[in-house]
Image (tube, helix red, strand yellow):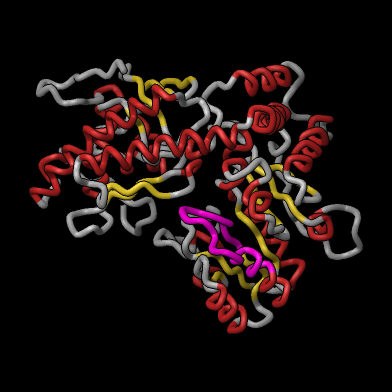
Amino acid sequence: MNIQVTDESGEFALPRSRAANERLHAVIPGGAHTYAKGDDQYPENLAPVISHGRGAHVWDIDGNRYVEYGSGLRSVSLGHAHPRVLEAVRRELDRGSNFVRPSIVEVEAAERFLATVPTAEMVKFAKNGSDVTTAAVRLARAVTGRPRVAVCGDHPFFSVDDWFIGTTPMSAGIPAAITELTVAFPYGDLAATEELLTRYQDEVACLILEPAGHTEPPPGYLAGLRELADRHGCVLIFDEMITGFRWSEAGAQGLYGVVPDLSTFGKALGNGFAVSALAGRRDLMERGGLRHSGDRVFLLSTTHGAETHSLAAAMAVQTTYVEEGITARLHALGERLAAGVREAAAGMGVGDHLVVRGRASNLVFATLDENRQPSQRYRTLFLRQLLAGGVLAPSFVVSSALDDADIDRTVDVVAGACAVYRKALDAADPTPWLAGRPVKPVFRRLA
């Protein structure tokens, strides 16, 4: 694994990464361009700064190699520097990346997307998930004439824009009048959702949710939401940023057979290249176009949304998923990993404290304390041990570039981490194994 022990005490350390993190904080608020990548999400002084990646591995600037999970916050599902994607990108780079009129690549990419996600009738591309989810909300408000947005309160993130961020602990700078227009409903509870829609009768423009998360939808739930949205006259929006491709090539809507009015895709769509998509019913989407007689909706208008190389990457990703059965491979890898981690945790007597959750293609883990309550301190302990063993794993979300040897190596490192976890549980105090402050939640009011 080429892990280097660099400090005088013999403990794993990252001196170059530590210095680079100081440089990052000096010029970038938060030290990263995504809060989930911040060094506060890692044990103190053990936040590696990445040099490069290939396949399922990344190297930090200290020279250490890691098996990586959750690659690019779930965006790099084929592995880093995937050859089919890079080949498609390179072909376009020599032809120009952005023009004053649409390129032929735009229509080819749209047609490819709609063939892959046949439940949608039109699509518009952008660069990030927040832009397309906000566009979906704006469109829903326009077509219904209603002000309120109903979000699934059990799902962690929808957009950086005010309508959502105002509902989080990081709501500074967002007027209360905007936040008050966003209301929440619980996942899996149709009765509570209907009560919400009745309470705000004729005020709710849309229901927006991830169609699935760390648990499978209860039987009939998504179909029940579809019926509720129809009966109450609101727009049903599926946020498929994570479920898109990882659940099936056509997203969760393709797997579960429930068609939303609008849906949003990103992350896996570009395998790390910046591309996202808003897709949905023609009669709704066309309100942001030029071929209708109603008031125009400013749907999406982005200078870089149609960069040719990113759209070429998206087409290559979709082709690879379909031709190589990537979704099935992700599930097989995830099942092998989950079984190994659970066996290792049980073998060390911490099976009730290190808990693997989620669909096999989208695994996360929970770290529970001696009272079986979620614990950031035990998460810190666990992450320290993984990093020292050459595993970079803020989650256990797999990429298709992993192989059996990577999984086996990960399980071995997890077993060693669980042995330390057991010692901390026996002491009822993980502090001696933290070597610094605990990791912190992303959404919090104070730094």
Residue at x 62%, y 72% (from the top left corner): 148
Quadrant in the rendering for residue 281: bottom right
Quadrant in the rendering for residue 117: top right
Q: How many marks?
A: 0
Q: Position of residue 115 (x, y in %)?
A: 78, 40
Q: Is residue 337 above or below residue 140?
A: above
> Could you say which is closer to the camera, residue 74 or residue 370?
370
Q: Is residue 181 visible?
A: yes
Q: Position of residue 309 (x, y in %)?
A: 69, 26
Residue at x 49%, y 63% (from the top left corner): 166
Residue at x 30%, y 15% (from the top left corner): 2
Q: Is residue 313 left or right of residue 426?
A: right
Q: Position of residue 373 (x, y in %)?
A: 25, 59
Q: Is residue 215 magenta?
A: yes
Q: Is residue 189 above or below residue 347?
A: below
Q: Is residue 19 visible?
A: no
Q: Is residue 87 magenta?
A: no
> Could you say which is closer to the camera, residue 267 or residue 286?
267
Q: Is residue 289 left or right of residue 386?
A: right
Q: Please report the bounds of the magenta region as a residue range.
A: 208-226
Q: Is residue 209 above or below residue 33?
A: below
Q: Is residue 170 left or right of residue 101?
A: left
Q: Is residue 99 above or below residue 158?
A: above
- Quarter in which the N terminus is drawn: top left
Q: Position of residue 221 (x, y in %)?
A: 59, 66
